[in-house]
Image (cartoon, coloured by chain):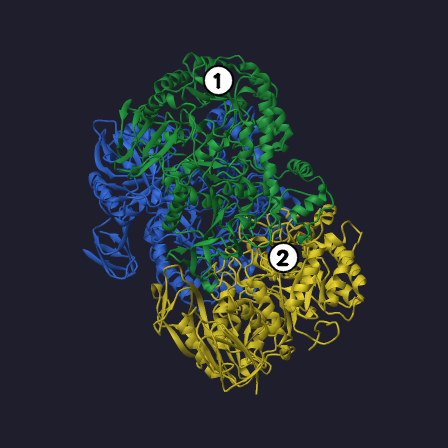
Chain colours: A blue, B yellow, C green
């Protein structure tokens, strides 16, 4: 296990704990806290995330005394600390002394202090104060035995991903100068001849603020890239200070990886972490939040290049920021945690230890709820701590999956701009449309980035990859040539990295690979539909497709369409490509059709599930363990033999998992 | 009758009239106006509400001449005047000379002149000009015989309840300093340790402007309190001038009391009025606007501490500001007015006398519509004037109800903040859910504030009282101890006056009183539901409840719920408390269940309707009168004997009220 | 044919072409372009619409060299040029040197450069630079043989119709001073006595910026008038330069006439054009976009006072700016174009020649799509070019219709303001409700403005003409007196040109003409409805109507209504007026009732269709030609004899038009 937390004492444990915000509570509560933590099996807490205004109550005056006491107290109770640099939110004095630190929205409104993250990602003023604080904290606690890891800032970009202030504008121009070298190259990339936007110098460029109508799409794309880079630069600046002062202590910042967090290109952030950590909250907008949870976990592992990672935050029960915040039902807490462990998490933490009495997050659940430790939630928390302690054999184990789903932030940014074929096209949906049936098939999936090595995969799914570089397109084609089945879906390969259309017919970059050519997108209006040759219905997206390679086979055709535009034309095709095959799916398929097509592809690729099973069971393989989670109210059966860790009993050749229960089997 | 209008001649009459805006019309129209007023039975008009730009056309130059003529004209026709101070909307010269008077919204946009109320509630500049005008008018008309009362400003806070300008910020800091004394106390109350918001001085605090995400909830709550206080201070400043110049003339400003006007804490405003007046418009968003009308009237009477009040504005037919503005149907005008009279109104007025030909309100109905006096509306107006003249015996009579519904503005402000269990929880709905079946049962209700004396009530309903002070919680518990039935509903007692959660389990402040403890809120998503032991369905809100007092009885239990979370747990409970009983209702009940529960509670409390009746009849008791309003197309019957005032005939022992008709019976 | 393009060589051709934006492409593409243009039958292109940043890359430095080459190249291939003045969008250097040129929205936010039309309509700075550029271009190309017409700017007001900056405020005050002379007259017109808005001088007036609530409606109306005038003044300024430098070359700017473009009063713009040109895109919000297309074409012809006009832009297939951008189906391209030709278009052009690879409009279809010339779209483009070449006999021919539908921009502006009887009342719907059944009846319609000569019409439809001047009201009454059937529909005649209500009962200006009087509007809420005497249902709007003239006949009455308000009252009436008749329709009618009423009116007026037909056929008469378009999948038949131009064959006495096909028959 590389770059894992620096456990006091040195022997690795399962991380288990929470954000710990003791500054909200009187000192006598702290004693109860550590006693309850021990009861719950807590091994690590994140301390001090919002402590800036406490530890630096005025410019340059530092006071760590309460935290000294807390660090000692936690250590005395055997609890390691992932210590925050405290820079997630600036203190009042900073924004009053430097109001230019406050972010500005696209319409020019200043975003006031009083929430959190009220700072401009490009602010060098903020960076100066933040790195000064990080240095002081690191110097102060460098030798403290409780210090296990650094937690830099918090959820970068959750609310301040984009700022349109003059400072941001200056840095954007610097960034553009570095990217393009000459303004002529910018003009080429952005297509500024349209709408008379040709710039004579970088000085004339501004961020994509509120404008009379659609702005330049490549300007918006570059601004998204720039913004992610600026936030990352803030992280790197703090990390460099920490590496200098405490070279042996691993550094992380908690990502918010998942299909709903759009603005940080975590593929670029991952390599800058000593260990990857992630926050995941159940997606209330989803019918099956378990699918999204699994996707996010697989994506997090991807950002960690397969290394174990920390689930830094999740909720024990309801969140507070949704429209309707429903509690988790009994047992769900553990099922959610185990799904993350199954996908590489070596640490499970919550926001937060004790539910706040005041402030914006007081109705967010916690390990200790408002009702106190005599509560269902705290009892489940204790149960989870005990269970995790029994899973130590899983620590450090890796996955070895044969299926890759390609996921790219820059394509996401570019594909959801306005003035597109349909404004409600969502990258998230295009990706989950393929991830979900894979999840349901209990096929292990790696979610990989556009620069991933695809060599080890037998199936590579490329859903809705609107923007693709030549290099990535080549890598995908090479994967097929070397023997993989590659599935490219509609609205892929359309533009290059400058958001410039690849001419000659869609899917542009993949046209030769898949051997078809699309003349037009056919997004369907509410009420419109297209029928396929198998009788199924397409309701959102189709394309006007022609086979352009003799070897291409039509798997499904369009049977009827508005105005007959598509009748008889190909809808799904496959073309032999080297040793492999390249599939093209030009339409959003009905669920049954999708499942049947996936079965066909998996069969061609020779890929089966983690283990044969019956009933509604989620099965995941991690190293030499099979994890089983029953998401139904009926029992389920899986063919597996070995040693079940939660009950510490041998099992096999069949294991019955009761309704809603779980199992972790060391095989063999 | 205390503090009622100073009727010219001295003998009290039923107030009947309108806002009168003669400056919109040529002088010849004035003559027609007073003739038509006499025909309609008008006794009082509000004059000069928007006269500022007329009477002070430039800074410091005053010209009252047209109003002199109008005052004389009205007086000559026996019409009293509720004279405006004219300060509802500033004239153009004021905002151009002092642009800092214009309000600023949370995003920093200045709200331009050109509508109405374009002034900042904290502006001392505005206050200076407004009080100067009030003084000049008072001095000018102090001895005019038509002067019956003062009408200060108009609908304070209708459009300018909150201002975020630098002046407001300064005054907010002053207000906070007065409230908290030290910034440490503010930090404690606001819970600023969360999100690093700890202030080092009051200077660092700003209003809750647009921020990157959820702001501090107690900051928002205090800003609401401050804003209501600032508007009230504007009123008090004018009132003080008027009291000084015309000590015998009562002063009022028209409230907009009702379940849709949120931002003025009228419980604090009421005691500052010599007589309470209110504007009420039918609630187009309501299926049963009569219920909302009745609630608003009961609440207005509450603000007037039981004294008679003035219905200062309603509409004769359609309003102009709704989405679809439908006329009132024949007879509705009278039924609406009588419902207000039944609940303590001694005056019924309209906005406005004559429908405007121009401006933003030209499509608002009036006593004289665009079609002129030969119209259905004007005929109904004349009929109402004649009827009111026959109701003089009702003047000054009070109600004597045994049921109190507790209604609190500060709880409203706090409970509808964001980041709560469900964002669409509405205080209005929680309150009307209990007021409506009481109204339908013809049980007389007082709507009372959090500081009310609850001693006289046999039933106290406490719906959704999220924020409650210790004092109010104690008063409610005392009411039960002394013998009342107290009904506490879900999401009550959660926080103290600082919006800090009362820990240990919900309903916090009422946990001991009701003898149950709730661990978690269970708001239900669309499509989710919970079933109760009586087979009924809960669709919006439930709680994870446990009985914590042996004396508590379960009235209804949860039968089935998502994930089984609530199965078998209590839903509605009752606990003996001293001589009385304390009920807890943890869920939003289906209508039938609600009605049946209310019947049980009323029966326990020994409370019956105003009089036995059949058919769809609204029955209200005012003093020794019973008012009956038939809201249906069938006749209805009530057991009552006495003298019917509208027909001037004896009735009894039964009175039949024909479809859509009304009756006013002096009992005995 | 007057004022038509100056064809090189002098012999008129059907215009056929596109916006041509070669600056987006390398020089080698230009050669392919002209070759493909010849293949497609292109005769004219609009060149240089967004060339400003290219031809004036810095202030005062002009470089036309690439355009010199292009003009020569196009001319060498026989293609005429409608040359742009290039002023549609300013270059970056202009807005950076003069940031005050950027528009400002009602809330005070500056609209940044980076989209298009980022200039304030009142900016004299912009006008100075724009006219300088126009002069330089005119002087440079005055003698070029390819120059056929001038295309000034582009789609004026598409995104910058209103600006609220200080410059706009100054010019608005100047405009108001000119309109009203004295501020007292402004006060009278605007009704400023309401809400204390009386201005002491023009200096106190500002544009209708964001305000606390509803602003003054006449202020908003005047600001709309002013804004349209300011944009027109920008056009006129450029046109004057062009007329001076190239007196023989006709000047146009492309309108966006149709029921969705609200803010330019094209009745005032039409007379300023040497030839009228229009952009029309299929209306994705419409179930029957062909109806809207026909309406827009008839309205464009109205703006051109019956003269032939240019369809300057439409799309070959999908647009890019809708919510869901569906391609046109096979054959639709031609059917749409022919519908415009049938209504007076002598030129059909597209946006744009070649689909962009980059920029905000890259997903807008073009004559040459991304897929290239080997595509369905380009094949249909070539087919259309060939067909238009065969329609030369139609050039210059005019329509001779007997039905007028009155359409007024100022009434539109006034009628859709807030604080009206129903906020969702839409002028567009009121007009199309009558245009659509006329279209379906194949009755030729002129869409005319409020100042039109109505003398030639036998039927004048006046739908929802909320605002009407005395002069227009008189002209409409005169039309009836002289023998026409006049149909006035609900919410007509309500206010004068100052948006001041015409008192005494609705429909105000038309009360005497139609002989009825309405006391109240009865807009219906969702769920409410009114039944008519024919059993049909009214769901949106009714009125409380009384007959006030003995000669008025009730055609349809209200049968039942909420609260019985309308029961038995008139709904549709007719009154003899001189030699003609005046109908009043007080409600929105169900489709069948509407159709049957229209049939009755047409019969009274003695008006029949273009020709007898069966099946779903659109028939239009232009000069001595009948154009037939089959919009259905079944064949249709029309009684017509003559020579069919597309097939160059004689036809008659019956012509069968196959499914989806078209015909153009020269009669006789």
Q: CA distance from mark 1 to mark 2?
A: 63 Å
Relative side of B141 to B497, left or right: right
- Residue position marked by numbered label 2 in the rendering: B161
Between C561 and C534, the residue placed more toward the observer is: C534
Q: Is residue B552 above or below residue C490?
A: below
Residue B538: x and y in percent read: 39, 67
Crowding at mark 1 (Cα within 10 Å: few <14, some 14-19, many 20+): many
Asked whether residue B50 is in view, the answer is no
| Quarter of the image where one finds residue B479 | bottom right
| Quarter of the image where one finds residue B248 | bottom right
Residue A9: x and y in percent read: 44, 52
Between B397 and B562, the residue placed more toward the observer is: B397
Q: Is residue A654 above or below residue A607?
A: below
The local secondary structure at tag 1 comes to: loop
Q: Do tag 1 and tag 2 residues touch (Cβ < 8 Å)?
A: no
Name which residue lies at 46% across and 12% down: C72
Name which residue lies at 39% across and 56% down: C537
Crowding at mark 2 (Cα within 10 Å: few <14, some 14-19, many 20+): many
Relative side of B203 to B463, left or right: right
Viewport quadrant of the N terminus of chain B: bottom right
Asked whether residue B463 is in view, the answer is yes
The local secondary structure at tag 2 comes to: loop
Viewport quadrant of the C terminus of chain B: bottom right
Most extreme residue toward the front is C579
- Residue position marked by numbered label 1 in the rendering: C6
Res A167 label: none
């Amino acid at each position: 296990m590389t770059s894992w937390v620096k456990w006091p004492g040195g022997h690795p444990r399962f991380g288990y704990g929470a954000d710990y915000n003791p500054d909200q509570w009187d000192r006598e509560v702290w004693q109860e806290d550590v006693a309850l933590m021990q009861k719950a099996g807590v091994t690590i807490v994140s301390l001090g995330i919002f402590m800036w205004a406490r530890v630096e109550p005025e410019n340059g005056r530092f006071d760590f005394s309460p935290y000294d006491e807390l660090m000692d107290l936690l250590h005395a109770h055997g609890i390691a600390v992932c210590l925050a640099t405290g820079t997630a939110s600036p203190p009042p004095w900073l924004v009053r002394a430097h109001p230019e630190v406050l972010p500005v929205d696209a319409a020019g409104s200043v975003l006031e202090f009083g929430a959190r993250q009220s700072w401009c990602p490009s602010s060098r003023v903020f960076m100066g104060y933040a790195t000064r604080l990080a240095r002081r904290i690191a110097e102060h606690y460098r030798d403290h035995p409780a210090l296990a890891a650094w937690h830099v800032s918090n959820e970068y970009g959750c609310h301040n991903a984009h700022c349109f202030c003059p400072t941001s504008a200056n840095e954007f121009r610097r960034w553009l100068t570095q990217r393009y070298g000459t303004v002529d190259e910018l003009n080429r990339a952005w297509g500024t001849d349209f709408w008379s936007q040709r710039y004579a110098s970088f000085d004339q460029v501004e961020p994509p603020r509120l404008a009379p109508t659609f702005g330049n799409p490549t300007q918006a794309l570059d601004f998204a890239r720039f913004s992610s880079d600026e936030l990352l630069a803030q992280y790197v600046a703090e990390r460099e200070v920490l590496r200098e002062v405490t070279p042996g202590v691993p550094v992380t910042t908690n990502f918010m990886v998942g299909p709903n967090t759009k603005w940080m290109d975590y593929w670029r952030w991952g390599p800058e972490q000593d260990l990857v950590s992630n926050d995941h909250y159940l997606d209330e907008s989803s019918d099956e939040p378990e699918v999204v949870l699994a996707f996010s976990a697989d994506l997090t592992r991807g950002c960690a290049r397969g290394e174990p990672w920390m689930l830094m935050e999740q909720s024990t029960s309801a969140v507070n920021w949704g429209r309707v915040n429903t509690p988790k039902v009994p047992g769900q807490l553990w099922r959610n945690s185990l799904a993350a462990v199954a996908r590489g998490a070596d640490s499970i933490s919550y926001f937060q230890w004790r539910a706040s009495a005041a402030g914006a997050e007081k109705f967010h659940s916690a390990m200790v709820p408002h009702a106190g430790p005599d509560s269902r939630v705290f009892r489940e928390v204790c149960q989870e701590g005990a269970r995790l302690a029994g899973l130590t054999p899983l620590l450090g184990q890796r996955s070895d999956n044969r299926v890759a789903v390609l996921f790219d932030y820059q394509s996401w940014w570019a594909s959801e701009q306005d003035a597109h074929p349909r404004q409600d096209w969502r990258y998230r949906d295009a990706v989950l449309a393929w991830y979900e049936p894979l999840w349901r098939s209990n096929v292990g999936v790696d979610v990989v980035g556009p620069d991933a090595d695809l060599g080890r995969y037998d199936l590579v799914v490329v859903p809705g990859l609107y923007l693709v570089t030549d290099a990535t397109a080549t890598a995908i084609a090479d994967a097929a040539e070397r023997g993989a089945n590659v599935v490219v879906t509609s609205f892929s390969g359309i533009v290059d990295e400058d958001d410039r259309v690849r001419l000659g017919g869609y899917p542009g970059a993949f046209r030769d690979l898949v051997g078809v050519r699309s003349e037009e997108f056919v997004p369907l209006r509410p009420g419109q539909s297209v029928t396929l040759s198998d009788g199924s219905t397409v309701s959102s997206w189709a394309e006007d497709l022609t086979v352009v390679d003799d070897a291409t086979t039509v798997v499904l055709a369009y049977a009827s369409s508005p105005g007959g535009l598509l009748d008889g034309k190909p809808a799904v095709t496959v073309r032999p490509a080297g040793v492999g095959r390249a599939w093209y799916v030009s339409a959003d398929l009905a669920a049954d059709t999708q499942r049947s097509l996936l079965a066909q592809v998996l069969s061609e690729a020779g890929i089966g599930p983690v283990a044969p099973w019956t009933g509604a069971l989620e099965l995941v393989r991690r190293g030499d363990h099979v994890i089983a989670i029953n998401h139904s109210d009926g029992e389920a059966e899986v063919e597996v033999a070995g040693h079940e860790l939660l009950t510490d009993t041998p099992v096999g050749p069949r294991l019955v998992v009761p309704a809603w229960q779980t199992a972790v089997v060391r095989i063999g």
